[in-house]
Amino acid sequence: MRLAFPVAPLALLTLAAIPATAQETPAEKTAAADVIRRMGELERSLALPPLVARLAGARDPRRDAVIARARDLMDRELLAMADDITRHPETGWKEERSVKILADYLTAHGFAIEMGVAGLKTAFVARYTKGTPGGAGGPNLGIIVEYDALRGTSRDFHGDQHSAQGPVGLAAAVAVSEFLTSSKTPGTVTVYGTPAEELASPAAKTVMYKAGVFKGADVLIRSHSSTATQDPGPGFGSCCMNINVVHYTFSGAPAHQLQAWDGRDALMGVIELFNHIDGLRKTLRPETKIQGIITEGGKAPNVVPDRAAAEFWIRYPDPVYLAQVSALVNDAARGAALATGTKVRIELDSSSRNGISVAALNDLAFAYLKKLGATKVDDSPGRPLPFEETGTVATQIPGVGLTAHSSNGGYHTFEMEADALGEVGHHGFMVDAQTMAAVLYHFATDAPYRATVKREFDGLHGLYDEYLTALRSAYPLPTVPEPTGN
Ligand SMILES: [Zn+2]
């Protein structure tokens, strides 16, 4: 689930100084004006262009050896592993074969596997064991890998290329961990296996974060399929808007179809909910996206359904107005229940929120993606794009998502799956693996670079809190009086 919307270049403005922002709506832009100005100051103070040029442009045989090792592992073993996982798609929470392949490989390369972390059967953590204990006070380099396939109507498929994320991450993990040991560089590597990205409930990374799985990670890095090679801008945003996934379960009373007045029709409750939401749409801000499906609608037309349910995905560009929309939809459900004599249970199943997008990491990664031959490079400033979709982890730990061009098809298509097995996919995965190794190498070996990442992340984190505060006053609720006489 990843969609990056490229932004058009801002004409007549100096691009380097003006980050492309995720603030889309007039209310967001107004509320964010001061925050965006200070974000610009923060970014300029980091002087990232010379820093990135110094790291990516320098002659550095040790770095080149780490990159070469990642490339070699991809060439000899890991591209084949990616093909194998692509050809055996497993949907969320059922990725047992894929996880075993990844875990066995990591075990063979000196990692200790903890399977089933956070109570999730196909989640794992792999810790490097051959370095100095605890990394000797050096940074903990975290790599996130996903492996779930999409549910298709004809068959399950790897139309988002999560099949390659594991092999890409493993190449970097092995190359960098071997380097840490052989060079006696303080630091360690941890691979986080995060299942079921395509299934919102529950959001695996949120569950894992809350269980403390990511504790101690100083940086997190993940690769993902991409239809172009892009450089996300600094700031806060999300790939696909802030989302609430909500379940509405209606209960009624059963009766014979011919004596329906003896019962109460739970399906009517669900249908009224859809109608009420359609009635609400015109009073909602236009960027609101609400889509629902009926997950339970009764068993037989000759029995009045005493139970029916719907699942809604409610999206808005920011979390503050989203909360208002969700409250209205919940009231619509209560209204639907009242109108039909049924009862409703409302459950917030999961949510996705903005994450923080760190230019010190994104820009260095982008420099390497280009240097290492990524294709279909889009040099226009990108919107902020966090490294994971829930926002839970990406607001707490700095990280970066790598997006080498790996498909000419759209996301979630059979074309993207076919590309995973072909030249465009293999080339993109190869570039991602080497870039991941290079970025982690710099993070491990360059303390000033680490400090810059931390300063930017901490600064953006503080500004995000201020942005949310500003937004709260940007969406005042109207006062609705009691109806009075005529
Ligand atoms: Zn995805």
Image: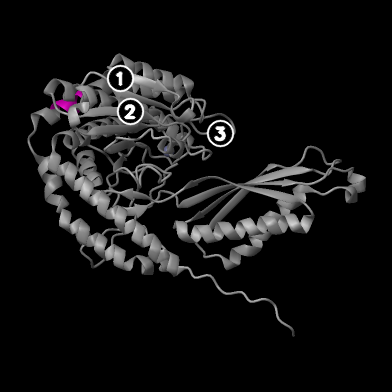
The answer to whether residue 92 is above or below residue 253 is above
Residue under the image location 43 percent in, 35 percent down? 211
Q: Which residue is mark 1?
A: 111
Res 317 seen here:
no
**Is 66 included in the stretch rendered in magenta?**
yes
Q: Secondary structure at mark 3?
A: loop
Tell which quarter ligand 1 is in: top left
Mark 3: amino acid: Gly
Q: Is residue 24 left or right of residue 434?
A: right
Residue 202 % position (x, y): 52, 38
**Is 447 included in the stretch rendered in magenta?**
no
Q: Quadrant of the N terminus?
A: top left
148 or 270: nearer the eye? 270
Q: Which residue is mark 3?
A: 152
Residue under the image location 34 percent in, 36 percent down? 406
Contact flag, marks 3 and 2 (Cβ < 8 Å): no
